[in-house]
Amino acid sequence: MTGSIKRLTLGVAVNLCLAQGVVYADTPMEQLQETIQQVMLTMNGAGKRNDPELREKLRSALMPRFDWLEMAKQTLGKHWSAIPSRQHEFVAVFAEFLGNSYIGKIGSYKDEKIIFVHESIEKNLAQVNTKIIPSKGESTSVNYRLHRVQEEWKIYDVVVEDISVVANYRSQFNRILANGSFDDLIKRLKEKDSNHKD
C-alpha cells in the first residue's frame, strides 16, 4: 500500500504503547485507555520484541477493541454487497492484515506520550481525540471513531492527522477492484500481511 499514507496508518500503533494509569469504566475514552494499558503492561514485561508469544499477547489485548466486521464492510464500500458468500473471508483477511501491521510496529516506538484530548458521544457513536507527543519533533493527532456494540465501545475507524484509515483503504481497494478481481485483492492483502510478519 502507499508510502506516506501507510506510515500514518501504521503510526496509530504508537498510542497503543503508552498511557498513564488503569481505568475501568464504561465511557469510550475509559475503555480505550483500558486497552492501551493492557498493551503497555504486555510491552513492559516483554523480552524480545519479535517474540511470537509477545505478538499473541498483544493480539489478545488489541484485537477485541476493533469492530473488524464494520471496518471491513466500510473499506469495501459498494463492493461489499457484491461478495455475500465471501464476506466472512474478507473480514478475516482484513483483520489479520491491519491487526498485524499495528502489532508489528509497536516495538519500533519508544519515548512517546499520549494525551487524551477530548471525548464526544452522540447516542451510540463516539469519537476520542488523542495526541501522540514524541520525545523530539511535532505531535500527531490520532482520533478514534467508535460505536457501541452491546456494552462495549468498538473502534470502526481511526483518523491520523485528518486521514481516515477506512477512507484510505477504501480508495486503495477501489483501485485494485477496478482493474482486477476480488481474488486479486485478497492476494495483495495476504502478501502485505506476510511482510508484516517477517
Image (cartoon, rainbow, N blue to C red):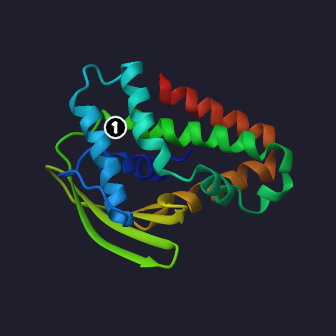
Give x and y (percent) for residue 167.
Answer: 58, 62
Quarter occupied by residue 133 = bottom left
- Name the one closer to the observer, 1 or 50: 50
- Name the one closer to the observer, 23 or 5: 23
Q: Which residue shows up at 52% across the image and 57% down it?
A: 165
Above or below for 58 versus 166:
above
Residue that mark 1 sits on: 106
Q: Amino acid at mark 1?
A: Ile
Q: Which residue shows up at 77% across the image and 56% down it?
A: 80
Secondary structure beneath disc 1?
helix
User: Going by the image, does 174 lie left or right of 104?
Assistant: right
Quarter occupied by residue 86 = top right
Q: Which residue shows up at 77% across the image and 50% down it?
A: 177
Query: Callout 1 environment at 10 Å: few (<14), some (14 to 19), or many (20+)?
Result: many
Q: Which residue shows up at 49% across the image and 58% down it?
A: 155
Above or below for 21 versus 126:
above
Give x and y (percent) for residue 50.
Answer: 36, 22
In which quadrant of the rendered image does the N terminus lie? top right
Give x and y (percent) for residue 82.
Answer: 85, 55
User: Going by the image, does 100 lie left or right of 141?
Assistant: right
